[in-house]
C-alpha cells in the first residue's frame, strides 16, 4: 500500500492517538475528531500518555524479567520514541519484533519501526487484527519470529476498537491459541468504570465519526485473559501497573487514565 491511498476524508484512531500525544502525523479530519473527544473528555490526552507509558513498562518487564525475545505488536500506531522494539532490544539486542497495523500512514513510517539493532530483527505487516490467519501466516512474520517459541502478543489500545460484533474475544483466543507455552498476552483497554457518562459519550463520538468503538468494564477486560495466568498486580488501572515514582503518569487519577491493563502468561 502506498501513501497515496491514505484516506484523508475519514478520521483514523491511530492518527487521533498521534494528535493526543502532540504528534504531527495526522490530518485535519483527525484533529477535528480528536478535538471533539477532548471537548467531551479533557483527560483524553492523559489517557493516551498513560497507555504509551504502559507499553514501555510492560515491554521492559517482558524482556528483562520474563526473558521474552520475540514480540508481536498488533495495532502499532504511528511511531513514537521509544518504540516497542527499542525497549525490547535495549534489554536483548537480538530481540525480534513484528509490527502490524491497518492504517497506510503507519506504513509510511514503517522505516522507523524497522530500525532494528544489528543483532535483532523487525518486520512490519499491513494487516488487521480481525484477520488472525492472515497475520499469523504472513511470510514477514514467519521469517522474523518462531511461533514454536514464546512470544509476547501486545494488543495495546486496540481492543476498544473491536466491538463485540467483530467477535473480539474469539479473535484474541485465535491469536493466543497459536502461541507457544511461555508466551504472554498484553492488553490495555478503555473503561467506563471511573466516569461512565463521559466515556460513553466519547465512545458515541467515535462511532458517529465512523470508527467502531466499545469501552469495557473490569470484568469484561479480565475475560480476555481467561485460561491465562495474570502477572501481578493483575488487571488494574493503567497507571497502577508497576509504575514507579519516576513515571510521569504514576500520579494520574483513575478518571484521567480511564483504562485497564493486564499482562498474562500462557502455561
Image (cartoon, grey):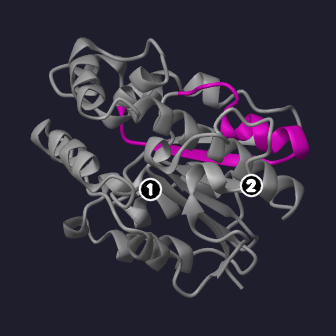
Picture coordinates of residue 261 (x, y %)? 55, 59
Q: Residues within 10 Å of mark 2 (few under 14, many from 20)?
A: some
Q: Residue at x 70, y 57 (%)?
A: 145
Q: Residue at x 26, y 31 (%)?
A: 37
In the image, residue 133 above or below residue 209: below
Tell whether label 1 touches label 2 (CB within 8 Å): no
Q: Magenta segment, which residues?
A: 79-103
Residue 51 picture location, percent across and down: 55, 43
User: In the image, 199: left or right of 70?
Assistant: left
Instruction: Classify mark 2: helix, strand or loop.
Output: loop
Question: Tag 1 or tag 2, which sits nearer the N-term?
Answer: 1
**Quadrant where the image shows the C terminus:** bottom right
Q: Is residue 82 magenta?
A: yes
Estimate the spatial distance between the alpha carbons at disc 2 and disc 1, rounded to whole Å.
Answer: 17 Å
Q: Residue 242 — which label?
A: 2
Residue extending farthest left: 208
Name the residue: 36% across, 23% down.
Answer: 2
Residue 91 visible in the snapshot = yes
The residue that label 1 is drawn on is 189
Amino acid at each position: 500500500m502506498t501513501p497515496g491511498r491514505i484516506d484523508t476524508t475519514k478520521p483514523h484512531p491511530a492518527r487521533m492517538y498521534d494528535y493526543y500525544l502532540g504528534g504531527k502525523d495526522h490530518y485535519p479530519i483527525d484533529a477535528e475528531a480528536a478535538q471533539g473527544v477532548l471537548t467531551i473528555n479533557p483527560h483524553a490526552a492523559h489517557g493516551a500518555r498513560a497507555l504509551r507509558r504502559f507499553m514501555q513498562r510492560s515491554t521492559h518487564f517482558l524482556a528483562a524479567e520474563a526473558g521474552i525475545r520475540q514480540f508481536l505488536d498488533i495495532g502499532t500506531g504511528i511511531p513514537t520514541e521509544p518504540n516497542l522494539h527499542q525497549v525490547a532490544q535495549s534489554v536483548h539486542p537480538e530481540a525480534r519484533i513484528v509490527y502490524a497495523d491497518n492504517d497506510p500512514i503507519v506504513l509510511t513510517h514503517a522505516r522507523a519501526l524497522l530500525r532494528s539493532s544489528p543483532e535483532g530483527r523487525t518486520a512490519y505487516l499491513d494487516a488487521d487484527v480481525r484477520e488472525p490467519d492472515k497475520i499469523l501466516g504472513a511470510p514477514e512474520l514467519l521469517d522474523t519470529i518462531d511461533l514454536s517459541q514464546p512470544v509476547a502478543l501486545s494488543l495495546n489500545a486496540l481492543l476498544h476498537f473491536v466491538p463485540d460484533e467483530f467477535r473480539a474475544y474469539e479473535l484474541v483466543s485465535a491469536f493466543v491459541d497459536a502461541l507457544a507455552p511461555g508466551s504472554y498476552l498484553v492488553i490495555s483497554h478503555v473503561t467506563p468504570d471511573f466516569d461512565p457518562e463521559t466515556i460513553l459519550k466519547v465512545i458515541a463520538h467515535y462511532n458517529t465519526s465512523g470508527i467502531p468503538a466499545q469501552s469495557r468494564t473490569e470484568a469484561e477486560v479480565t475475560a480476555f485473559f481467561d485460561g491465562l495466568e495474570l502477572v501481578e498486580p493483575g488487571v488494574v488501572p493503567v497507571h497502577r501497573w508497576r509504575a514507579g515514582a519516576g513515571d510521569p503518569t504514576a500520579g494520574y487519577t483513575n478518571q484521567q487514565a480511564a483504562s485497564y491493563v493486564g499482562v498474562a502468561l500462557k502455561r
